[in-house]
Image (tube, coloured by chain):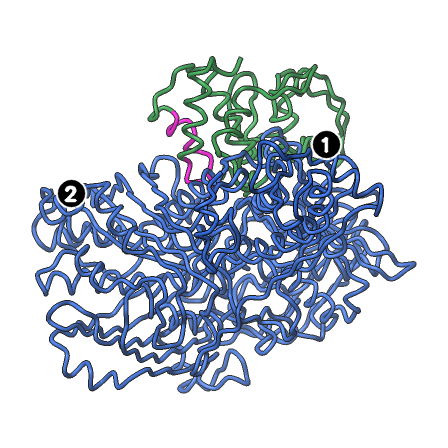
Amino acid sequence: MKKQIVTLNINGEDMDLRIAPMDVLADVLRKEAGLTGTKKGCGQGDCGACTVIIDGKAVLSCLTLAIACQGKKITTIEGIADQKTGEMNPIQKAFLNHGAVQCGFCTPGMIMSSYNLLTRNPQPTRADIRRALSGNLCRCTGYLLIFEAVEACAAEGGVL
Amino acid sequence: MGMNKMYEVSNKYHDYKDYTREYTEVGRSIPRLDGPAKVTGKLQYTDDLSLPRMVYAKILRSPHAHAIIKNIDFSKALELDGVLDVLKGSDFPIDYGIVAHSANEQVLARDKVRMWGEPVAAVCAMTEEIAEKALELIEVEYELLPVVVDGRESEKFANETGVLIHEDKPGNIAHQGTQQYGDVDAILAESDLVIEQEFYSSQYTHAYIEPQAALADYDVHRNKLHLYATCQVPHYTHQQLAKCLQMPMKDIRITVPLLGGGFGGKGVASCADFITSKFSSRVGRPVKCAYERSEVFATHQGRHACYMKFKMGFDKEGHITAVDFNNLMVGGAYMSWGVVVLFYTASMVHVPYITPAMKFAGKRVYTNTNTCGAHRGLGGSQPRFAMEILMDMAAEKLGMTPLQIRLLNAVESGHTCRSMMYIPHCEYKKTLQTAADNCDFENKYGKLPFGKGIGMSGGYYISGTSYTLYLSYKPHTVANVKIEGENNVVLFCGATDIGQGCDMVMAQMAAETLGIRSEDVKVVSRDTMLATFDLGTFASRVTYATGWAIRRACEAANQLLFPVAAAIMGCRGQEVGVKDYQFYSLYEKKRKNVDWNEVVDQYIQANGPIITAGQFTPPRRKGIQQGGNIGHSPTFGFTTQIAEVEVDLYTGLVKVVKITEAGDLGQPINPMSCEGQVHGSIQMGLGNALLEEMRYAEDGRLLNPSFHDYKLCGTIDMPEVEATIVESYDPSAPYGAKESGEGPIQPTPPAIFNAVYDAIGYRCTEQPLTQEKVLNYLKSIGKNL
């Protein structure tokens, strides 16, 4: 299918990208924008590894058409660290320091869902966290240290 | 300074620091060194890589589970603009397989397909979209053959229909074997109690979140291949590539980017490894192939389903007298690790309880289902599931508690099994007692209200294997350490970090012996050209095996540096210690010490950089009967888990509320990481117990090749876990460390099954323990609300 140049706002930057109408956002981010931090674990909306934030909502980028994202603000795992210094976002530091990362493949999606939760609900309960991350599968960690990381991040001042 | 302690160091401790365990780097819960790259999305996995002029490959897979390939017509596919090349079975005339003696897998099916999803042909094209389109244009003519899905029917099916899955395997029997230690029949006849029970352990898959991918870069001018691949045993993939591509190993380099999980499934070479390599050599461009999730399921090589018949004898005090174990293992279409797994299931019966006599008859049959192979806790999980339920059944009959019968039979350090398997170190009893104490097991078991229950199980696993699959006598692991200039320590060791964090653990072990900080050790691993040889990531061998190799390499470096430090400090070379970047006199630490950098600098000024090597091969231990070499290990880790469950009497849903775990993993190198291994094991074990099963239609189609239909334990299902690392130190192990990532998956399913029995009296012996089964049971006893 023929590709066209489409402008998407990704991590605060307008990027002119080659996009065909049927391209999903996950592929465009990874292949056209070079942002391979967003992972594809299933391509069917089941695993959550491709989670990004579009206009404040956590979204599965493997089920989202890229052309439908024009005029919207897309935030990926590369976009939540300090864009000037590269310093990690507190939720990224919390994942690292609480042993919430093993193989790391689900991590970007987990972090984006956690980040989104904390922007909506700065003091979530354990049940809130379980619910907010229920669309993200991890096969390594058993989730518990991820919950601890989110709680620690909330306790230490949140993500913003 | 502990002078007295110094003299107490007995021969069984390697050195003074091991005796006092005054470690500075071992035992630190540092975040993993690749962590920042992982949490920021910067880390590139195989499918994240791209190379200039890269093109894409896709695999056509069989929609049938058993069929003869009459013809493949590529003409329409080749007419499609952007299609570069195609491959079919005859392009790969040589079979491959992880076990050289029984290799029977085909890169692309040559004459017939034996399972749904088997690779039949491959396409290389300018884009993934064109490659996908081209797959649809390939015309394959199949002649369908009768299909057998049920492993219990396979032998009969072969004998009655005359249709064999592999022509050289009569009765569809992939392999069979027997072992006998003692006159089991006679002992059982004289035992006070004999429990006879059948069990079914289901087929499940690894479900790592990263699908397999391969990126091959073939230099057509120099005939050299560089493959980036998702493999956890690069050495085996290296051998298989050399064999199937008919290239010398020296012309092949494999680089493994960090893996997004493996759990045994990425130990075998993938079809993508072979076809990208072949295509790249033919089209002169880098070629990438990344699997769809359904392809990951089709090629999974996960846990073998087992139909197990057990007879277990006890005397009236509760001692095990003998075990009779008959195992029918459903292998699927190809051999994979099959022979190994079959005999592991036999070996793993002998521990963690003293088993004076044992008889095994095992058979692995072929079926037209997806091939099974190595899966976390390989060969241990199935008999453990059965035996831990049997222990509870026996305890009930004998008027004992589950804890009492386990403590009575538990093996201890220095145990030699009837199979000659030797357990140098064991704190299993301590794990039993600790877990029971931590959740007040003895006061809860049998005393909770209907619908609530508590159940116990033990488990253990090997820490490496004494026996290799490849036919060679070289060391299992080699490590090099290079010290050049200021703080510039580089550790070379080809072990593969599949997510468990061995890059970090290896840095910690090197830093401990060198007396520096783990964060300052640069690790070169996962590359067959740059790193030194390591056998691979399986059998929980990495920490133990690389630990010794790394330690020996670092000790060799210290042997060069100690005399220099001694000369500066004014003491004897053998009286030097090192820690926290300081060399010091073991006897006068405060008065005589010198900065590590100064010593290194002095040495390098005179001699140039330090490069030392260390290696490890496990002690030679062998079995005495057929398949008996399998299961021997330098040492073993132990664990106990206690599950607390609530059964919903309306819906039959089993909610696991809490798991209390206590583990003997020796000295943890990184306790936070070990805790993560335990949590992850429990999560996987819970899924295996309650949710997971590969399901097949009668025609052999896999019915649930997606995370939508194959459910994993998610955030909502995960119970609270209280994990305790018991005080333990294995003097035979490097830094006292043992495995922590495969033992803890063994007890989770039986602990949950035992807890459900305690809750509602349902003695289920077939996995998975679905809501439907529980509900039917509740209805049968009139307790469904």
Query: Looking at the image, is A76 positioned above or below residue B176?
Result: above
Task: Find residue B34 and report its image quarter.
Answer: top right
Q: Amino acid at mark 2?
A: Lys
Amino acid bearing label 1: Gly
Instruction: In this rendered view, identify the residue nearer to me: B705 or B532.
Output: B532
Judge by depth and name the residue closer to the eye, B242 or B18: B18
Q: Regarding mark 2 in the picture, which secondary structure is present there?
A: strand
Which chain hosts label 2? B
In the rendered structure, find residue B306 and report the number of the disc placed on it: none
Extreme-front residue of the structure: B570
Chain letter of the green region:
A
Q: Which residue does the image show at 59% across and 75% down from the upper left?
A: B104
Image quarter of the C terminus of chain B:
top left
Residue B570 image offset from top left, x and y in percent: 69, 40
Which span is picked out in magenta? A129-143
Towards the viewer: A150 or B355: B355
Mark 1 belongs to which subunit?
Answer: A
- Tell me the residue that label 2 is attached to: B452
Residue where numbered disc 1 is placed: A34
The image shows residue B675, relative to residue A75, as above or below, that is below
Residue B682 appears anywhere in the view: yes
Q: Do we see residue B289 in this rendering? A: no
Magenta region, main secondary structure: loop
- Chain B pictured colour: blue
Q: Is residue B397 left or right of residue B114?
A: left
